[in-house]
Image (tube, rainbow, N blue to C red):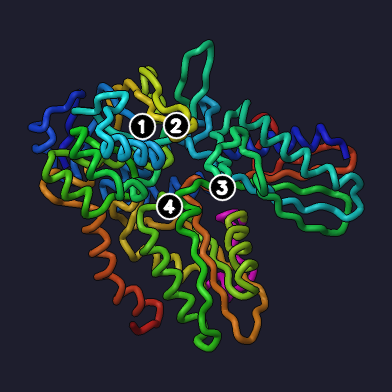
Amino acid sequence: MELTVLEDTVFNLIRHAAIHLPPDVKEALKKAYLNEESEIGKIQLKVILENVELAEAHKIPLCQDTGIITIYVRAGAELKGLDKVEEAIINAVKRATREVPLRPNAINPINNQNSGDNTGRFSPQIDWEIVSGDILELSVLLKGGGSENVSSLSMLLPGVDFKDLKTFVIETVIRAGAKPCPPTVLGVAFGGGADLAVKLAKKALLRPLNKPNSNPKLAKLEEELLEAINMTGIGPMGLGGKITALKVHVDYAYRHPASFPVAVAFSCWALRRASARIFPDGSVEYLTLNSEEA
Amino acid sequence: MAVYYLKTPIPEKEIRQLRVNDVIYITGLIVTARDQAHRRALEYIKSGKPLPINLEGLALYHCGPLVRREDNEWFVLAAGPTTSTRMEYFEAELIKNFKVRVVVGKGGMGEKTTEAMKKYGAVYGVFTGGAAVLAAKLVKNVRSVEWLDLGVPEALWVLEVENFGPLIVAIDSHGNNLFIEAARKVEERKTQIYKMLGLHS
């Protein structure tokens, strides 16, 4: 695997995610603008849409909080040189911080020193999955601090079906209020151990908004939760209105008989993600962007 | 919902006429300050030390901008608001001591800030979270930067702005707070929501 191809691809994905919203997210925001009834809520969505266009026109990150960076790697087991992937990702992050530019957001929590280049212990966060084949698939998620701060985990009683899960999700959304920059996208995951639930909830944000859940029962749960969330009246930026969330994505894992973890992850309206596939011949297919934008 | 165009330094009288849900645009100077800058400002207040800039009549902006430096000159590329609730612990003291007239942010502020705004004459204006490029386009010039040792996001950026907004007045100087009101309304709707979900609580 050519390391320069890998580094360039990660750099392009970060730059793209920071500047352009994916088409499905833009579509959802436009629909939200049309459906919002509150006057102030509508102003917020109008400003959001204007900002998205300005960012694209001037090639500037759409939000000053370019977020914490998570790179999801799905690596074909037949690939050689996987030990070099992390180094290439770190180089791409440093370069993106200088050239896009990104705001330096990696802070050593022991002494509050900002590393200045978005790298440090476990930064960027890299999530590995080994799959069969010889393709390397990369997804980048840039997530701001405001939405990260309202993430939540609860270890529920296993005997009460989905009732406590629904209550927990609604209470979490109400507690979050205006803080995660609504309208949000929610990732909800249940089952697993605590760590897996949190991880799956965040990863659920990668699913395109126009792709329904493959499990009909979960698809129904997603719709039900979305309807309930939008009944809260929190609205765009928490200033009141009909549209508090754009979408809810649910995922699950098998659980221990005694445990029922539920995790909720939020994305602000600026759901910034981008994906690409690198083939053995070095060619790159960008999955969320047009080639001229890369 | 009325629309106002304000120029800094903003007199208290102009602040007193504003009501929640009004829309304001600010021309003049706004100064960014987030977590660490608030912490340091509070230390300065306690030790009687003056701030590097006089905030009287100005707007204080909860923002950690994305900037670029070219030939010793700073340019603001993106400058949307950060969540204001984290500054709740500090803000009342800053309003009291420095006569800040507008606090700009997103996500809302609490009772202590609402009280201080009522007592000393200030409002809280919400700028749309994430609308950072739009905000940066309204910045005409970086007047100066102070406390850069705190890091780029945490420094005090003194920005010249033109018609900075729309800012929704979410806390006025008469004790009204849109976010506290909204939270109460949400609580009232909970019964209906849980009924829809087939839950009884």
Residue under the point 62% across and 34% down? A117
Write down the residue under mark 3.
Answer: A110
Towards the viewer: B122 or A138: B122
Residue under the point 29% across and 22% down? B162
Q: Amino acid at mark 1?
A: Thr
Write down the residue under mark 1.
Answer: B32
Residue A219 in magenta stretch = yes
Gap in Å between the C-alphas at discs 3 and 2?
24 Å
Towards the viewer: A195 or A250: A195
User: Could you tell me what secondary structure mostly forms the magenta stretch?
Assistant: loop
Residue A29 in magenta stretch = no
Chain letter behind tag 1: B
Is tag 4's residue or tag 3's residue first in the polypeptide sequence? 3
Q: Nearer the viewer, mark 1 or mark 3?
A: 3
Residue under the point 49% across and 76% down? A165
Gap in Å between the C-alphas at discs 1 and 3?
25 Å
Crowd class of label 2 (few under 14; some 14 to 19; many from 20; radius 10 Å): many
Q: Amino acid at mark 2?
A: Pro
**Is residue A180 at least partly visible in the picture?**
yes
Write down the residue under mark 2.
Answer: B65
Write down the residue under mark 4.
Answer: A180
Give the residues drawn in magenta, as a range. A207-220
Q: Amino acid at mark 4?
A: Pro
Q: Are marks 4 and 3 in contact (CB under 8 Å)?
A: no
- In this rendering, is residue A291 above or below A175? above
